[in-house]
Amino acid sequence: MFLFEMKATGPLAQTQTVEAVPALTPMPFALPDTTWYFLADALGGDALALPALCTALYSSYALATALCGIEGFRMCYVAPALRTEELARWALQHFCGSIADMRELLESVPCFVRPSVSVAAACIQPELIPELFSGPMDKKTLLLIIETHAPMGSDESVLQFLRHPRDDHLRDDPEVVLADVHCSGAALCFASRRLQGDRGFVLEAVAIDRGAIEHVAANLRFDQGFLRDAAERQPDVLWIAAGQLEAELAAKAVRSFPRGALCRLREELRGRPDIWKAAVAADPMAIEFVPRAQCGREVVAGALAKTPHVLRVVGHWQHDRAFALSALSREGLLLSRESLRLIWGDDTEVVGVAVAQNGLALEYASQRLRGHPQVVERALNQNGLALAFVVRSMRHFDGLVRVAVRQNFYALAFSHCCGAVEIQEKARGARLPPLPSSQTAWW
């Protein structure tokens, strides 16, 4: 046994010094509820393994109220006479277990308490609604469940869990559906067909959650006037519903959402030069979705001039040496792309350009080039830490280590040089000897 001080907050909060008892060791004497509270606060769920605590918990309502929030708490630990509605609600409010644990908690509650507790349980786990409510759902109760469930950050609709045949009138109630849209735009999918085709209602739902646009009725899905009105309320509608747009709205969509909209457009619209050129002008990476037949050399060169990362998405132009040199001279780590590594990883000129821009690109060069004198030198002059990727047989060269350490002192960690201690001492004193006039003297 040992003594320790525990502090906690709550109705029983005060500082006490108690003896910590190993789990599963019964206590030969009774402790006040306050002490048990602090002990449980210190041990968490492990405290319920103490038989003496469970004995005290069974007959103490105050202790049950204080401990119902800890992991592993079960209502069956409390005497049936103490399983009140207030205790059950408090336990649900602090509930952090699985659906199976909640079922067990509800089964432990007396029958006369269960109806009032069921609503609180449904607010936390709506998927239990079919089990908790055998009859039709009341509108007031359903709104209470939805409004309580919405702030919890869930993205699931409550309407999807209504199973009773007499609940259909709730799916046709605008107030209920709009309340559920606040939980998830997919709630419109579980609304009645009348509401899914009601233009004014759907626009109101889209204004709340853009995802509702995916569940509108067929008569509105390709209505360009409706889509234009929806886009005024939620601009993201343009790329979500891009597959349903005509030319005018498609051009507007690709200017605002170049990649997202272009990849969703119908094939005939995606192939129109005015549309894909507008997308590429707004975002060069949108060239990934330009039809291959229209993605010529001039188009790729223009996009590549804006960002070297274009080379990642134009696979059929990755074999072009001029494009590879242009991109890697501005972003050497593009060589990490598997397709580019397979094509150019063993090319001395291309890898040399890449490591000159970023020495760490040496990691993606072939084994032969990681031991090539000129390539290694260019990498180390740019970043001394590239010494980690030089072939092991070359890391013991004194001159090579000096080149790396002069650029970055921490490169010494990757050295196998016999004179590393001397180099380290000189580097710390900032008195590294000057490199020889010939940069290739070390080999």
Image: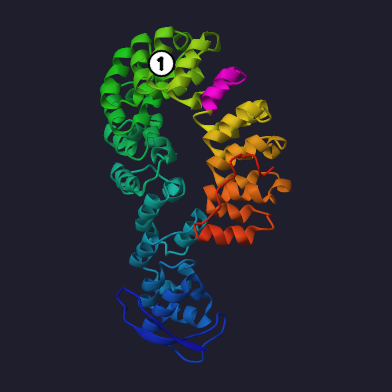
Left or right for 403, reference 418: left
- x and y percentages locating residue 225 in the rendered image: 29, 14
350 part of magenta stretch: no
Bounds of the magenta segment: 311-328
Q: Is residue 315 magenta?
A: yes
Whole-percent x, y for residue 325 in the image: 56, 24
* Coordinates of residue 405 in the picture (x, y in percent): 56, 51
Identify the residue at horizontal 61%, vertical 61% (top origin).
Answer: 422
Query: For this rendering, which residue is in front, 380 or 423?
Result: 423
Residue 338 can be seen in this image: yes
Q: Residue at x 53, y 81 (%)?
A: 51
Residue 223 visible in the shown view: no
Report x, y in % for residue 153.
Answer: 37, 46
Identified by mark 1, the residue type is: Gln
SS under mark 1 = helix
In this view, 52 is above or below 430 = below
Whether 317 is drawn above or below 151: the answer is above
Decide whether the magenta segment is chiefly helix, strand or loop.
helix
Other residues around mark 1 within 10 Å, as few (<14) / some (14–19) / many (≥20): some
Q: Is residue 422 left or right of residue 159?
A: right
Taking 335 as reference, is 425 above or below it? Answer: below
To which residue does mark 1 refer? 244
Above-or-below relation of 261 to 390:
above
